[in-house]
Amino acid sequence: MTPLNQRRWANFRANRRGYYSLWIFTLLFVVTLFAEFLANDKPLLVYFDGDLLVPVVAQFPETRFGGEFPTEADYRDEYVVELIEAKGWMVWPPIPFAYDTIVRGRRAPAPPAAVNWLGTDDHSRDVLARLIYGFRISVLFGLVLTVFSMIIGVSAGAVQGYFGGWLDLTLQRLMEVWSSMPTLYLLIILSSVVQPNFWWLLGILLLFSWMGYVGVVRAEFLRARNFDFVRAARALGVSNRVIMFRHVLPNAMVATITFLPFSLSGAVTALTALDFLGFGLPPGSASLGEMVTQGRNNLHAPWLGLTSFFTLGIMLILLIFTGEAVRDAFDPRKTFAARPE
Amino acid sequence: MAAETLLEVNNLKKYFPIKGGVFSQTIGYVYAVDDVSFTVDKGETLGLVGESGCGKSTTGRSILRLIEPTDGKIYFEGQDVTALDKNAMRSLRREMQIIFQDPYASLNPRMTVGSIVGEPLEIHKIARGSEKTERVASLLQKVGLRAEDMRKYPHEFSGGQRQRIGIARAIALNPKLIVCDEPVSALDVSIQAQVINLLEDLQEEFGLSYLFIAHNLNVVEHISDRVAVMYLGQIVELAPDTDLYNDPQHPYTEALLSAVPIPDPTVTKKRIILEGDVPSPIDPPSGCHFHTRCMYKEKICEEEAPEFKHIGSGHWVACHFRPKA
């Protein structure tokens, strides 16, 4: 790490709130990445007739356990349970439901209990399981959207700022027109034509979200292209592409990185809003927005509304705190301030 | 002069358009460099002096095509620089380099000294890997730094040391010509002499030619073989340095030299105080550009631009009354 980045890291750590927020968020994200091992309607391990099987990663037909159907075994089915336990045992994940498992034997929506820690929703699905899967897909969506819009936005801003002139002028005007397109209407129209899935939504939001980065990066490139060290590089015969990547981009990334956690929380909110309105992920997917809708529709089942509220609230707060710490870390006034020894 | 001409600049012009109005049409020009011609011989140092904003730096940068000249021809070893395409220009960049005024702005703060000085070697595929490291180490030693310094960042150095890094970067490609754009103006007086001596040593070792841009006449006198004086985008006088300092012909040069302080309290000399400010290069005066401030002004000066005349032994001047009739 360069001395500059060391000081930034020190500044970041000095903001305890943001530092711990990042760790908690990372922990939650990494845990939910293994959602299949945490909440699933298949056992983690099956010991059957001398064989050790892992149904979470591999599929086994019911006939494998002496059943009747050649389809995948339903490990929650009493008949299958009996078959397996006759010749072995099963280890279940802590939450024995997947996000789409129908919880039998309880009236939907069922309140929190030992079986369903956070209750079930109005489709009789376990809320905690849905929460874990929903958190994962929200964060993944946010991350992918942020990374892609950053790549597009930074490239567009870099090209505009570095070359300037007519190219800059034309692209700026095009962007102004483009940014006035109503995203939501476009999505509503589109969802009547196709069933939007993860990648459709990503694509459509990406069409508009990249523009957020252009402004800061363009400004930074406009400024930096007249620096003497950029002139010196040009005099040495360094190509424009290398100058942009090696000499200007690292200086322009500060604003972009500062923007990143806020952009991530924006992307998460965007997906939630679309899901809430019913224009988001296909019905049945685990999604926080859909859970908010359920909370609104089932006011008599407050665990639905409260769960989605606290999940979203905590996730966004963690991201914002992290964002504040990142902003502090990259603040030149703090980075270059005299450090107490 | 028997020496071979390395660089020849003919009628160089650079006008910067001023945009304005609703459709940002061009409403005027800044005549930054207006018809400048000179030559630089192999192994020679040509000093270029003038006030701020007279077009010295624009001239220097136009030669390297960091700024595209509006008009005029630049010949480097007989090759027309202004006509070269991108690739030919890139290979020509090995032959001419630039040293900037501000040693703080001219080095990328995020790169180590090793990668700053090594970049030209890498870009022109001269050396890589351990060979590059060795080359960089020897370059740093040549400019009076230590080889270990290559792992440090620019902010760990003083202004003079940073300027040495800039010089190491400029000589990395073994150029024939270096445009020194006020290389010592931002440095302490004590450091100035060190950097000037370094430049002179390097000139001797590598047979470099310098176009040395400065506004400090003492510095220019020390390092230059010939000196050109610029005023409002034009060269008004060009002469071997002893001639220029002992026998200035142009009234502007006279005034400039009379303003140089002499560190001897017993010497009294007549100071020529110029009236007024430098006129704007957007709308330069008619005729001789200097007529608004000249003490010898006559009617002809307002009407007719003086010719840039050779008045003997390599002394050129642009004044209606020189040589004295």
Image: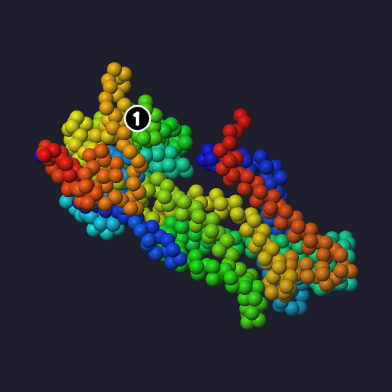
Picture residue at 43% right of the left edge, 39% below the top: B104
Per the image, the residue denoted by label 1 is B192
In this picture, residue A324 sits left or right of residue B40: right
Q: Compared with residue B24, is residue A18 higher up or lower down, i.e. above or below?
A: above
**Residue B260 appears left or right of A77:** left
Q: Helix, strand or loop at disc 1?
A: helix
- Would you say residue A48 is visible in this rendering? no
**Left or right of A34 in this view: B67:** left
The quadrant in which the N terminus of chain B is found is top left
Mark 1: few/some/many CA within 10 Å (<14, 14-19, 20+): some
Q: Nearer the viewer, residue A322 or A103?
A: A322
Q: Image point 60% across, 55% down: which residue?
A: A260
| Residue B92, image x, y percentages | 26, 51
Of residues B16 and A213, the one nearer the viewer is B16
Residue A4 seen in the current view: yes
Q: Residue at x 35, y 49 (%)?
A: B280
Specify how the rendered protein is coloured: rainbow
Q: Residue at x 27, y 25 (%)?
A: B269
Say what amino acid the circle numbered 1 marks.
Answer: Gln
Residue A276, image quadrant: bottom right
Q: Position of residue B21 (x, y in %)?
A: 44, 63
Residue A270, image x, y percentages: 67, 65
